Every structure is written in C-alpha cells, then in structure tokens.
Amino acid sequence: MRAMVTCLTLSILTGLAALPAQAQTDIQETEQADFTLVTLADGLDHPWSLAPLPNGDFLVSERPGRLRYVAEGRLRPEPVTGLPDILADNQGGLLGLALHPEFETTRWVYFAFSEGTSSANHTALGRGRLSEDGTSLEAVETLFRVNIDKARGYHFGGRIAFLADGTLILSLGDGGLYRDEAQNLSNHLGTIIRLNEDGTVPFDNPFASARGAQPEIYSWGHRNVQGIAINPQTGSVWVNEHGPRGGDEINLLRSGRNYGWPVISYGINYDGTPVSDATHAEGMEQPIWFWDPSIAPSAMAFYEGDEFPDWQGDLFIGALAGEHLVRFEVEGDRIISTENLLADWGERIREVSLGPDGHLYLLTDSREGRLVRLDRVIP
C-alpha cells in the first residue's frame, strides 16, 4: 500500500506506573510532542518485528511465518523466500529480527522463530543473507535451538539485539507451564542467552565453564522478555518482560544475574492466587520499574534522532494489552518521568523501532496489522 497520513487527536494518560515505593517520589509528569501517524504498509498478518534497512526499506516478520519487504512505502505482495520450516502455533511463529552490525557488507539477517510441533516445540535462532534485490534469504542456517521441548505454544521470548562487542543476545521465555525451569540452569527456558555472531559461545559468558549449566546463558530467572534496548547515555542493556496479572518489569541486564521469576514477583496468577509471597530475595535482581496492573509490554527503543529533539535519550515501549505507547524520560539509568501516548488509538503495539532517518516506527498486532511512522508536527 502507498503511504497514507492518519491524523489523530492524541490524548495523554500521564500517571505513575507502579514502582518500588522509594522510587515513586522521583517521577514527574511530562507533556508530549505533537505528531501525526503515517501508515506505510497495511494488511500485515500479526507483524512481530521490524528491521529498518540502511537504504530506507524495511523487513517485517509476520508471526504466521512470513518475512515481508516494504520498499518505498509499498508492501511487496510476495514474501521473502528462504526461511526454514516455522511452527506458527499460538504465540509462536516468526518472531524477532536483527541486522548484523555490518549489514551493508555481510547482508546477514538474524531471526528468531519457533519450530517443532504443537506438543513439542522450542525457540530457535537462524540467519541468512538477504539478496541484493531483497527477495530471498540465502545461505540460511540455524545457529541455536533451546535444549528442551515444551508441550504448548506459549512464552517463546524471541527478541534479538546486538551488543557493542559484536555479540548478540536472544530472549527465551519460560514456556508458560514450565515457569520453575527459569531457575534451572541446565536448560534455556526463562533465560537470555549470549552468542557470537556465528552462534558459538563467547568465552566470557558467565556459565561458559560451569558444570551442569548451559554455556549460552547470560542471565536467568525471566518470565518472557520481549523488549531489549541499549541506553545511549550509559551503554547499559535494558529489557522488559511480561508478568502475569501485574508484575510486568523493566530490568537492567547484567551478566550472570538471576532476575527472580517465579521465586519473587510483583504480580499474581491469572486465577488470582499469589505467584509468590515475596517480592525480594537475596541474590535476585530488582526491577527498576514494574506495572500493576499489567500493560503487556512489547518492544522498546531509546530515541536518538533529529525528528523529535525533545525526546533525545527517551525510552519508548509498546503496550499490547494496554494499547498505548509509553514514553519514559531517562537520566542515566534512572526513570525520571513517564507519559502514555496513543491511548485513544485502540491498537496493540507490538514493535517500536528507531529508523536510520530519526523517525520512530511502530507495528500494530492484528490480522490487519500496520507499519506506522511518527512524524513531528512543527507549529
């Protein structure tokens, strides 16, 4: 579809999400910039991840197992070919995308996906070289597979990010029914793993030489991380993860740390029973932010660009159940203000991505999903 401009009256729901009590006094209200939404492509089937290309085009993953190409504001009718067999079941399918840091030379595209069957499935990581015309992936290979199969299609994780040292991290969910495994280092469920670009294990991974632990594991005790972003002010890695009913979290990711799930939690189970009677435990990390009730946070991105000067260094997170876009003003590794945008839009926001042109891009999660750009309105 050709690009079309959608103008909205954007209301603010500015308020305080739940934080540890000692931090709430640090939060201030803010005011949003004026912007419009430009639809670049529609008709996407549950789009999950966006990879802006250096030439201004886009790759979009669709959860049912297709990789799509958007060129000059037009969605190509045929998917990119070359993907391996993908299991599209419940929350599983084609998930996160990431470009190699030297993509213009290597053409490597990394993708997370689910494979197996509805009764025995896991998350995997693959890569392939994007052809010059953008129609196919070539030299496709699977670099990693979770070492345990689960019986239902829930909590795959699937977000990928490259770190400053050239390694990559991949989030892996706890599998839903297997949440206690997030405290078991002998498998990958409920972890974030770190790999070299070719899928090998970095020598300095925290459990690379630990007996009985999986060497790929970088951090553990996670429920289902689906947002990763690197803070441009500090270089720290921020991740967000889904809680059950309440207890969605933002965490600072550190090597070898245990983030507590399900031993500690700020949420409750879907049936109203407690997940745990504790929110703190020795040797387990505390979030820097949590939501109660849950908003179901998706992707996250720090803003660095010229389109919105007032947003420099701010963090943006999409909300699925909450159907809005959260903006956090950040000072170092502290959140100092918050603002909810697009509260009247009525869309589940699956992806938030910063393009090389300095614009923010969103993907909406539905059978008629859209790729949308935020444009600043200049008074």
Image: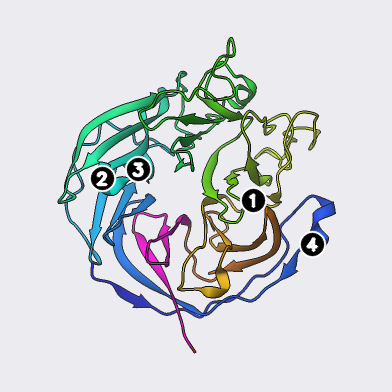
Question: Is residue 107 found left or right of 211 in the rendered image?
Answer: left
Question: Is residue 131 found left or right of 29 in the rendered image?
Answer: left
* Residue for badge 2: 105
* Residue for badge 1: 294
Query: Does the CB distance between marks 3 and 2 fall below 8 Å?
Result: no
Inspect the magenta stretch and tell me whether residue 352 lies in it. yes
* Residue for badge 3: 100
* Residue for badge 4: 26
Residue 7 vertical placement versus 140 (above, below): below
Name the amino acid, label 4: Asp
Query: Does the CB distance between marks 2 and 1 fall below 8 Å?
Result: no
Q: Where residue 242 appears, x then y in whole percent?
A: 59, 43
What is the magenta range? 349-378
Mark found first going from the N terminus, 2 or 1: 2
What crowding class fits label 3: few (fewer than 14 Cα within 10 Å), some (14-19), or many (20 or more)? many
Mark found first going from the N terminus, 1 or 4: 4
- Circle 2 SS class: helix
Instruction: Tell us which disc is closer to us: 3 or 1.
Output: 3
**46 or 57, nearer to the observer:** 57
Across the whole image, how many numbered discs are drawn on residues? Answer: 4
Mark found first going from the N terminus, 4 or 3: 4
* Residue 141 at least partly seen: yes
- Circle 4 SS class: helix
Name the amino acid, label 3: His
Distance between the alpha carbons at the discs numbered 4 and 3: 38 Å
- Circle 1 SS class: loop
Q: Where residue 25 appears, x then y in whole percent?
A: 83, 62
Residue 274 vertical placement versus 22 (above, below): above
Residue 88 vertical placement versus 314 (above, below): above
Instruction: Tell us which disc is closer to us: 4 or 3.
Output: 3
